[in-house]
Amino acid sequence: MSERRPSPAVAPAARLRERRNAERRFQLYGQAAIGIAISFLVILLVSIIFKASSAFTQHMVDITLDRPDFAEQSEFTVTEVNLAVRDRLTELFPEAGAERSTRADLFSITTRLAVLPLRERLSNDASLASQPIRARLALSDDLDLYLKNEIGRHRSVRVGEAGRLSRTDSGLFRLTDAGPDGFVIFQDQVQAIAADPQDILISLGGAWFELERVSGAVLVLSHLAGPLPDLGEQASAPIRATYLNSISDNRRVSLRQIAIMLHLKERGDISRRFNGSLFKNADSTYPELAGVAAALIGSLFTMLVTALFALPVGVLAAVYLEEFARKSRLTSAIEVNINNLAAVPSIIFGLLGASVFLNTFGLPRSVPFVGGLVLGLLVLPTIIIASRAALRAVPPSVRDAALGLGASPTQAVFHHVLPLAAPGILTGAIIAMARALGETAPLLLIGMVAFISEVPSSPNDEATVLPVLIYKWFSGAERAWEPMTSAVILILLTVLVAMNLIAVLLRRRFERRW
Amino acid sequence: MLETLGHLPIGWLLIAPLAAAGFFAFYSGRTQIGARTTGSSISARLHSQPNYHGYFLTFCTILPAALIFIVYLLFVESHARGTLIGELPAYLTDRGDVEVSFFVDRVSEHARQRTSALTGNLLFDASVERFAIIKGGARALAFGLALLVGALGFRWGQAQLTRDFAARTYVEQTVKALLFICAAIAIFTTIGIVLSLIYETIRFFSLPDGPGIFEFLFGTNWNAQTGQNFGAVPLFFGTLMIALLAMIVAVPIGLFSAIYLAEYASPRFRNWAKPALELLAGIPTVVYGFFAATLIAPLVRGFAQWVNALPFTPDTLLAAQPTSALAAGLVMGVMIIPFVSSLSDDVISAVPHSLRDGALAMGATRSEMIKQVVLPAAFPGIIAAILLAVSRAIGETMIVVMAAGGRALITLDPTSDITTVTYQIVSLLTGDTAFDSAKTVSAFALGFVLFGITLLFNIIALRVVQRYREAYE
């Protein structure tokens, strides 16, 4: 402060200005710090909500099985039902032909297991098998993503009026323009985009073709999907070209699949619906069929065990330390120990669980019972500390009055102090449970990452929990897992917010100032 | 019979009769003493109220039985496994402990299912059946023993109940003892952690293919998954590097937020800004990990590539990996902000007002008062807050697992992927792992180091906070 000493005449004013500026700067730093922290929070939430939003809807394809060719039986296997669906798809799209790769394109618009709900319907009501069934199947994840993200980049233009359609020896089609210029303008356009190559689909009267090349007045096409118009004169039916804005090499969806999707969409057979399987189903290897049900129930069981273990033990320990413990070396050791335990990294509790519960006591891996115990130990110090604070907030006059009326110390505590401290204890407990609900690392170490395709029915069944499901789906290779993961995060955060809200409301409602 | 019993899911089976017996004992104790003192003003002639007699009888009945159940729960599995292993044919046991324990794992898992589906493997099916029988036998024994002890306790307790029996004294002493046990569980947890970590660590260093202590602590080559290289220095380096990056973010932001909230903010602003900051601490770490890996890591990579492409930098200046120390560190820093800010806020608010008033009265501006009076006074507390935050950063797992990569490197380049102690613990212990290989056990040695370091930081920080409190309160 004393290095730059201005001349005496201006000194006071200039220095004051400098000090006021410093003051303003300092305040600004504080505001900026809070602003940065809160904007991080907002960015995090917004980005996750944004990513998750697409996972709550899903594209489904309606397929009507006209004469499902099932034998008379009550049990249907996935393979049988799947075969019926494939037969129907072959009927709808005969142009896929017999070649392996094109048939694979056709059949992979839904995955094998997508017929599970249909199979269930059939098993419940065998009479359905003898009449036409309308089946709604989940579109496979890549196609679903394409419809959600890419189809908006398609550009569709009218390029002429159809003249004559003919078939060449090699199975391709030739289409002439009824207009005077032929396809000259279109050819120029196609050549213009040669620098930025992209696939082009041509549609004519409900049929979809791939544009092989434009040669002067003729389009050379190969048929991909949709019923082929009669060969010959086309009576000036409109021809539309769809620019896909991508080429096959950097797309996960083939041109034929896009044509099939566009065709089905035009017929109204593809619809975007609420993704019910996200809530109903257990985990699956296919993103479009995977759901959180098993993890939700697993979390519930785990929390149940945690609460049953940690709440009574934590509260009673707090009662002992706050109300009964005499100052002794042992009790102060317990106190220091609890404070330290609260700051031990959570993964250490996972090591404890793996070594003691799994290895020494031989308890089973991956079950909510063990997970709940580990989380219970983890949140025990938090519950003890919160409960002690709540007990301490009850004024001594309450104890003194009870004792003065002849209650024993135990009676004073259990009849008077504890009920008065209950709201505070409950608030702390809910917050501790919220922490346990979001904990991942210790559960990884006791094997709760197993692939669980069935909803657990007791705390002793193998299970997984929501945060671990987030981690697992995050590690999945398919791109569709990312929105799915965000959706689970959103579900988890909603539960956490609800729990914290309850805690806040409890505090508001019952908080007492003594 | 025993086999069916062995297959039953036992947990609920235990609690229900115990609770029923407890209720029964309570009511019979209460009415028994009530019946003996028919007439007016029952309680006046009793030493303790009838309820206490009920409680006394309940304790007599269920506490010993509960003890037996706990012992049973803790030891049945290892007993059944031990017995089964003893009975396995020699050709299986000769294949080594890992093989055997894997086999018994599967047997145990199978036996836990309610209906035992035959697999066709004769030895396996026979083992499952035998395992269920052993478990069922132990279960029947525990159940019978508990029943016997409970009945004996009940009889004994009933004999004690007289009009001037001091039931309340005994009940209250028992309650206090139970309370103490609850408080002691915290101690047992610590002891459990320390003992298990020490035990496994000693085992690690005495394994034939394990390293020496010096190689572990000072070796620079870590490759536990495939090789047998257990030099943990790259892990320590990575952990410290990411913690440092996190602190670079968290300390200034947290500290300035705390100062602003404590000294400048209006109560209204404080009322919503403080919970908003604390929300950051309530978000599960796996969510931060996802955020770091999917949003921040690509940004960091893009930035590194941009720097590499600058005309005056060499093209390979930064590693620009898809997962990076910087991404993990930045997000971890954000996560830690509330730990720094709320603790610092507390210590800053605890500085006595007389100090502030004195400084302001001398003509200091608010910021001068804060910088020259409040912060020096709160300095030890702030250091403690930072230490606690560092310990949190060192122990943080999911963010680094998801966003920091797994290569054991020693590099100062923050855009390179890097590995940490916690990352390695998770990757070594996830999946089906036998507890006998050096690879698995090394996770416990790492955990031991982690526990030791964080404990040291915590103890120092808590000491400082306590001193500081004593100085101002």
Image (cartoon, grey):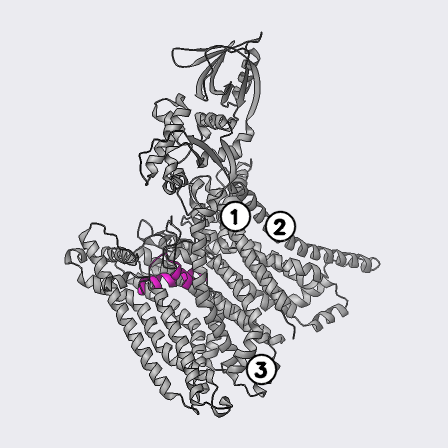
Residue denoted by label 3: A399
Determine the CA span between mark 3 and mark 1.
Answer: 50 Å
Residue denoted by label 1: B291
> Crowding near pointer 3: few (<14 within 10 Å), some, many (20+)?
some
Looking at the rendered structure, the number of numbered marks drawn on it comes to: 3
Same chain shared by disc 2 and disc 3: yes
**Residue type, mark 3 in image:** Arg
Residue A377 image position (x, y, % from top left): 43, 66
The answer to whether the residue labelled 2 contacts the one labelled 3, judged by CB atoms less than 8 Å apart, is no
Residue B469 image position (x, y, % from top left): 59, 73
Q: Residue furthest left?
A: B90
- B317 left or right of B255? left
**Residue type, mark 1 in image:** Phe
Q: Quadrant of residue A173?
A: top left
Residue A39, label in figure: 2
Determine the CA span between mark 1 and mark 2.
Answer: 14 Å
- A5 left or right of B228? right
**Residue type, mark 2 in image:** Ser
Given residues B143 and B316, the one toward you in this image is B143
Q: Is residue A364 magenta?
A: yes
Q: Chain of mark 1?
A: B
